[in-house]
Amino acid sequence: MDYLQIKGGAKLQGNVTISGSKNAALPIIAATLLSDKEATLTNLPNVVDIRTLLKLLKMLGGEVEHDNTVAKINNASINSTKAVYTIVSQMRASILVLGPLLARFGECEVSLPGGCAIGQRPIDLHLKALEAMGAHIEIKGGYVHAEAPDGLHGAKIIFDKVTVGGTENIVMAAALAKGVTTIINAAKEPEVVQLCEMIRDAGVEMEGVGTDTLIIHGTDRKPLKFKDTTVIPDRIEAGTYLCAAAITKSSITLDKVNAEHIRTSISKLESMGCSFDIKKDEITIYPTETIKPVSLITMEYPGFPTDMQAQFMAVAVIANGESLIEERLFENRFMHVSELNRLGADIWLKGNIAAVHPVQELYGADVMATDLRASSALVLAGLVANGTTNVHRIYHLDRGYDNLEGKLAQLGADIVRLKE
Ligand code: UD1
């Protein structure tokens, strides 16, 4: 198993290119199941989760040519509609094949994803919505068995909670359903918007894209033909590099980024004392010598993203006062707290609120990555900890960060990947 070894204290400088968004690419790849023609996707991030989903498509009988950032996918030859446990257990987002498989083929079996480190993460809202669209669903032997032999029909779906994956699954299902589907309380994340635009560009009439009410006019099982799609920049990767600059008190420039998508992270870093030069697809961050404490609550987009909570906590650790961080989306997304404390942080937890007390210094130690974003928070802390920090179990990082150690090393960090 690999681990990252970081010697803290180096300043960062220069430019870093932001990769395509993992969370945008995953539903886009799943959406290719709505088509029986070749689809070309570019600016894919080079991360394990993308390879896992492409592998699933191949297991279903799809033809996939993949070369780092480009994939050509042809799902004309799909001959299985079963997403097996071995893949879904590696990556929860595999559940995104449920809507498109059911809509195009009228039946599918998808392994239940189960819980994960950050919480239970049920899929009840996905299933309830598909049932409202005429699906018959049974849970048997750890699998969701879904059937709609005559196809799905349009319906009015009211999500009790804003769900990114749920919205994406239902948008894809609705694209091939018969009639009109209205989704109320839809997610508005940029990744959801890109999926909607891709489906709309393929000829599906859709209103309300980017709002919390989506109206989708289905094609009644006529497969779609997608235009070439370039994945949007990864807003979480971008935010993570801004935090790397803030914590190391360095100035760096992010290339190929969409500032609009990370405005909450930018405004929180401004409140902590950093300043910015923002151009069309380029952002330069100027650090502050004295980081001010922050108070933040995770929310759905355009609120502060839960996927940036751990990284901001790492920066808050060296602020000059107490920060308060409230996690509202996932019930167990504070696994990084005890690991940050092993590096000398002083963080206290009460329920879903973390109080981050200021400390003078962090000290290198062995720490363990617990989930994707928690892992990057440990790397950020390692960049400023005195001595050597070893971050173990970095397979979590590899799922979602494209060449994190290579990009950080290029910026001047002392970081290497080693074998246990
Ligand atoms: C996506 C992102 C993930 C991000 C999260 C929230 C991808 C691949 N992953 O995850 O990085 O942290 O959005 O921004 O895009 N819920 C239910 N029932 C459901 C579905 C969700 O109760 O059927 C709950 C979840 O447990 C959670 C909340 O709704 O508390 C939001 O989850 P959701 O938006 O669905 O997250 P994901 O799509 O899994």
Image (cartoon, helix red, strand yellow):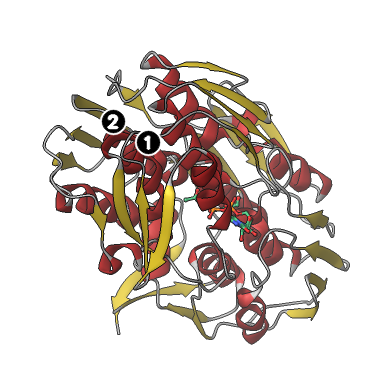
* Mark 1 element type: helix
Image quarter where the N terminus lies is bottom left
According to the image, label 1 marks what residue? Answer: 28
Q: Position of residue 73 (x, y in %)?
A: 19, 34
Q: Which is nearer the N-term, disc 2 or disc 1?
A: 1
Q: Position of residue 240 (x, y in %)?
A: 56, 52
* Mark 2 element type: strand
Can residue 20 be seen here? The reply is no
Image quarter where the C terminus lies is bottom left
What amino acid type is highlighted by mark number 2? Answer: Leu
Q: Nearer the viewer, residue 125 or 165?
A: 125
Residue at figure coordinates x 52%, y 63% from the top left: 376
Q: Position of residue 298 (x, y in %)?
A: 73, 54
According to the image, label 2 marks what residue? Answer: 41
Looking at the image, residue 62 lies above or below residue 138: above
Q: Nearer the viewer, residue 325 or 5?
A: 325
| Crowd rating for badge 1 (residues with CA inside 10 Å; few <14, some 14–19, many 20+) | many
Ligand 1 in which quarter: bottom right
Asked whether the residues under the numbered discs 2 and 1 touch, taking CB atoms below 8 Å apart as contact, a structural biologist would say yes
Looking at the image, residue 265 lies above or below residue 186: below
